[in-house]
Image: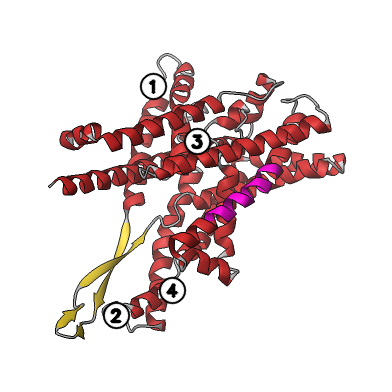
Amino acid sequence: MNNRLSLLLKDKDLRNKILVITLIFAVFRILAAIPIPGVNIQALNALFSNNQLFGLLNIFSGGSLSNLSIIMLGLGPYITATIIMQLLTMIFPSFKAMYYEEGSAGRAKFNRYSKYLTIPLAALQGFGFLKLLTQQGVLPHISLFSTVVSVFTIIAGAMVLVWLGDIVSEQKMGNGVSLLIFAGIVAGLPGGIFHALSAYTSGDLMPYISFIVLAAIVITAVVIVNEAERRLTVSYAKQIRGNKIYGGVSSYLPIRVNQAGVIPIIFAISVLLFPQFFGQMVSAFSLHWGTAITAWVANFTNNQLWYGIAYFLLVFVFTYFYTAVTFDPGEISKNLQRSGGFLPGIRPGDPTTSYLSKIVSRVTLFGALFLGTIAILPIITQAITGLKALTIGGTALLIVVAVALDTAKQIDSQLTLREYERS
């Protein structure tokens, strides 16, 4: 460990990459601290304390939303655009070919279309959120011109974050979007710890002990499930080409338990937030109906039981849905057949497709239950500890652990490559 750390610090190229990423994080945190003018801080804090959905959305904005900064939407519009583009691969064969068959050039074009789609999504989300903040008294009533300027500022902030994420990704030490979200979550830890300690009452240690034990269990479970996978043995038939024999070896096909990552949670948040934003859009044309929709949504989100059930079910369904998008048993079966590979005891073609579908369905069941539990973990934590100040953000933990593990693997691969080049 010490040897690899010293190599990381001695290598000039790796040091420069770490420096660039650190500077990007600093710029990100500076932008997150610049608020838009005219914010009523007390009304803003009340809005976030009474609405769990905004707390979840704040996670993906890296804490920018709670400050109402110029990058308040964070990377949410870009993530939503990416999800929509991936869904289009199931509908349009041209998008599927672009993403899966055209290689790096196709992926680059796919990402470019995702960035184009980010702009209108940021405009819609920004306008709806500004309307909500004005209605809640967080922002003063502003003119149409000021609203347009604010929306363009929000769009610019979202696109700047996408650009910063691309710069981080180019360093090849982790995914840029994930690392920016990771930085926002970690930056909010000191404030969360201080808030929890400020609620301490003398002699009342049991809730805090329960919190620490539960946090340790959750972190361990997140690490185990995030790394867990079902390995299917793949054998390759021998092929004779000239005087040489190829194949005849075995490998394995990994099927991860958490194949979908945090995408189902993002899906569920988007669905739960849509009625609120829709109500704000309707209120621009009909104040009566807009107010009625907003009131219904507020009552629903404040009901812990029904909110928790709906959130869990949405995450569960979207886990299966997104796994079907990213893992195509039919395509994998075809690729195995083309390369001369087969699953022992399973005939190539349709039988292999059916077998893979059955295995993925069973593995995804556990992953879906796990993600659903992680999503409603704050509600469970409050029920066990009895304190609102002590909540374990399961989604935040999942992101932090997943990003940390992925970044550590990429850094380790770069160190291994440099050790190999020096040997």
- Helix, strand or loop for disc 3: helix
The answer for how far apart the CA atoms under marks 4 and 1 are is: 55 Å
Identify the amino acid type marked 2.
Answer: Gly
Q: Amino acid at mark 4?
A: Glu
Question: Which residue has dot 1 on it?
Answer: 205
Q: Quick check: 263 above or below 90?
A: above
Which quarter of the figure has residue 357? bottom left
Label of residue 331 in the image: 4
- Between the residue at mark 2 and the residue at mark 3, the CA separation in whole angstroms equals 54 Å
Question: On the rendered structure, is 318 left or right of 344?
Answer: right
Colouring chosen for the image of the structure: secondary structure
Mark 2: few, some, or many residues within 10 Å (few <14, many ≥20)?
Answer: some
Q: Secondary structure at mark 4?
A: helix
What residue lies at 46% left-to-right and 27% top-to-bottom?
A: 26
Whether residue 399 is visible here, answered yes or no, is no
Q: Are discs 2 and 1 less than 8 Å apart at CB?
A: no
The amino acid type found where label 3 is placed reads Ala
Where is mark 3, residue-wise? Answer: 383
Q: Which is more foreground, mark 3 or mark 4?
A: 4
The answer, for residue 157, to whether it is visible in the render is yes
Whether the magenta-drawn stretch holds residue 313 is answered as no
The magenta segment is 111-123
Q: In the displayed structure, does residue 233 sit left or right of residue 159?
A: left
Q: What is the spatial separation of the Cα atoms under label 1 and label 3, in whole angstroms?
A: 16 Å
